[in-house]
Image (tube, rainbow, N blue to C red):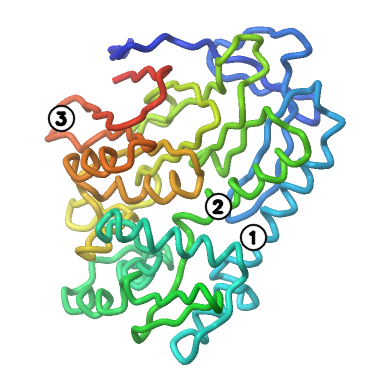
Amino acid sequence: MPKKVTSRRTFLQPKAWTSTLGASIAFAQPRQRPEKDQLIRAGRPAMACQFEIFFPASHRLKIGGVHRALDEVQRLERQMSVYRQDSEISAINRQAQNRPVEVEEGLFSLLRLGIDLYRETQGAFDMTASPLSRCWGFFARQGRVPEQVEIDRALHSVGSAFLDLDPAEHSILFRCKDLELNLGSIGKGYALDRAATILKGAGLGQALLHAGYSSLLAIGNAPSGDAGSGWQVSIRHPLEQNRDLAVVRLHDQAMATSGTGQQYFISDSKRYGHIIDPRTGYPADLNVSATAFAKMAAQADALSTAFFVMRPEEIDNYCKRNPEVGALIVPKSADDAPLQYHSFGLVPEDLEVYL
């Protein structure tokens, strides 16, 4: 039995969830709930994962709003995917080196948020880091260790400081050769935020949304009958797929987790994960898991990536400057030493960590 580490937290019993097909998904130790507490699950594939929305069965007549929210997720994939030549992001990447390109209002706001996070994290989050991922072979899923000259060349084409946004014209201009945008580390969270806005507009004040389980957004409370109980979710253990690292309740809050447990390669007995520190050009090697908590899913999504490459003191300072943000970090352990964890800033009250 793994050692349980608790800090002013209480263990939370998981519940049975019901899908639109009537099948039930049970987490560990499910227990039967009254029918009014059952959840309907609706989902669609988008952005290389499965987006899903859980909401109370008592609100089943509002399913139209759920479908509109999922429609918006798929529209945003068409807008933001770098793998579609007809996407708005691909058009920006082709044209913005030569002239200012007008950007749709919502996407313009997202780019502005990304630049703000780039500055606040001192470059740990960067929407222009694709040349580095390509240099290390992660785009082609053929990992390789590049020569230093290749890394240096790629670094010359990285930096959100080279993105010039014009608020008056809603346009963007690249002020660096070979610059390119990739919203893979913030786009899923943004899609969750937009979907949540539609759900609230449809009168759904209780819902849990996720994008491939790595990014989640909770609206209101779960229909458990417990005031302020929030939505119970788990954070997967970074090294053992069949274990939870932590269990937490979210209430009107977003959470995102980054790690390299599945995307990595080994060269000369050294392991290289796919999350690259855009400040150095090398795969991050400080942490094995980084979870960010924030009000907005786009912010949590981006910060989980940034926190993964940052040192504990950097994360601590960031959370102190941004008191609405929290972090749960599992640093890399030395040799066979047991894993430890650090929490910073505004983490949820109901959080229990198992290590």
Q: Sequence order check: which comes first, mark 3 or mark 2?
A: 2
Q: Which of 287 and 92 is in front in this view?
A: 92
Q: SS of the residue at dot 1? A: helix
354 shown above or below 10:
below
Circle 3: element type? loop
Asked which quadrant contains residue 89, the reply is bottom right
What residue is pinned by disc 3?
A: 336
Mark 1 to mark 3 CA distance (whole Å): 43 Å
Sequence-wise first label, 2 or 1: 1
Q: Residues within 10 Å of mark 1 (few under 14, many from 20)?
A: many
Horizontal side of 42 relative to 93 (left or right) equals right
Tell me which amino acid carries mark 3. Asp
| Numbered badge on residue 190 | 2
> Which quarter of the figure has residue 185?
bottom left
Residue 343 is left or right of residue 14, and the answer is left
Residue 127 vertical position relative to residue 50 in the rendered view, above or below? below
Mark 3 Cα-neighbour bin, 10 Å: few <14, some 14–19, many ≥20: few
How far across and down, in percent of the image, does residue 276 sit? 29, 58
Helix or strand or loop: what does disc 2 sit on?
helix
**Can you name the residue that lies furthest to the right here?**
61
Looking at the image, which residue is at 45% across and 22% down?
A: 248
**Dividing the image into 4 quarters, which one contains the N terminus?**
top left
Residue ID for mark 1: 76
Query: Label 1 sits on what residue type?
Result: Leu
Residue farthest along the left direction in this orientation = 334
The numbered mark at residue 47 is none
Disc 2 marks which amino acid?
A: Tyr
**First in residue order: circle 1 vs circle 3:** 1
Examine the rendered structure and indicate whether residue 335 appears above or below residue 273. above
